[in-house]
Amino acid sequence: MATNLALDPDLIDRAVAVSGEPSKKAAVTLALKEFIARREQLRIVGLLGQLEWDDSFNPKAERSRK
């Protein structure tokens, strides 16, 4: 999908240099993927402490289903 964006040329140049990607498109694509991954990680971290832990659960006992 073609999209026209007015991006800061200095940021694009820095992104290409830092990422080592061969093109501006590749650098922007990588930056977006990393941005999304980071936001998803932060959302998961936000769940810490919100789940109740079952102290009686024994993962080793669950492995041997005889």
Image (cartoon, helix red, strand yellow):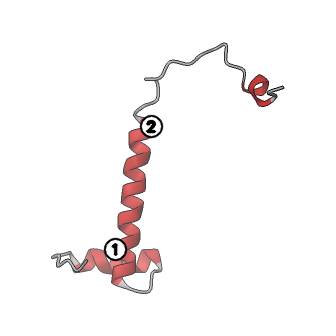
State whether residue 47 is above or below residue 37. above
Residue, far front: 66
Mark 1 in CB contact with mark 2 (< 8 angstroms): no
The relative height of residue 28 versus residue 62 in the rendered view (above or below) is below
Q: Which residue is mark 1?
A: 28
The residue under the point 47% across, 23% down is 51
Identified by mark 2, the residue type is: Val
Residue at left offset 41%, top offset 80%: 17
Q: Nearer the viewer, residue 31 or 11?
A: 31
Q: How many marks?
A: 2
Q: Residue at x 38, y 86 (%)?
A: 23
Residue 41: image x %, image y %?
44, 46
> Few, some or many C-alpha atoms within 10 Å of disc 1 (few <14, some 14-19, many ≥20)?
some
**Which residue in the structure is indicated by mark 2?**
45
- Position of the N terminus by quadrant: bottom left
* Amino acid type of the residue that numbered disc 1 sits on in the rendered structure: Val
At mark 1, the secondary structure is: helix
User: Vertically, is 26 above or below 66?
Assistant: below
The percent position of residue 31, horizontal first and vertical second, equals 37, 67
Q: Position of residue 57 (x, y in %)?
A: 67, 18
As drawn, the residue found furthest toward the top would be 56
- Mark 2 lies on a secondary structure that is helix
Earlier-in-chain disc, 1 versus 2: 1
Residue 53 vertical placement versus 36 (above, below): above
The picture quadrant where one finds residue 18 is bottom left
Q: Residue at x 40, y 34 (%)?
A: 46
The alpha-carbon separation of the residues under discs 1 and 2 comes to 26 Å
Residue 11 percent across, percent down from the top left: 28, 74
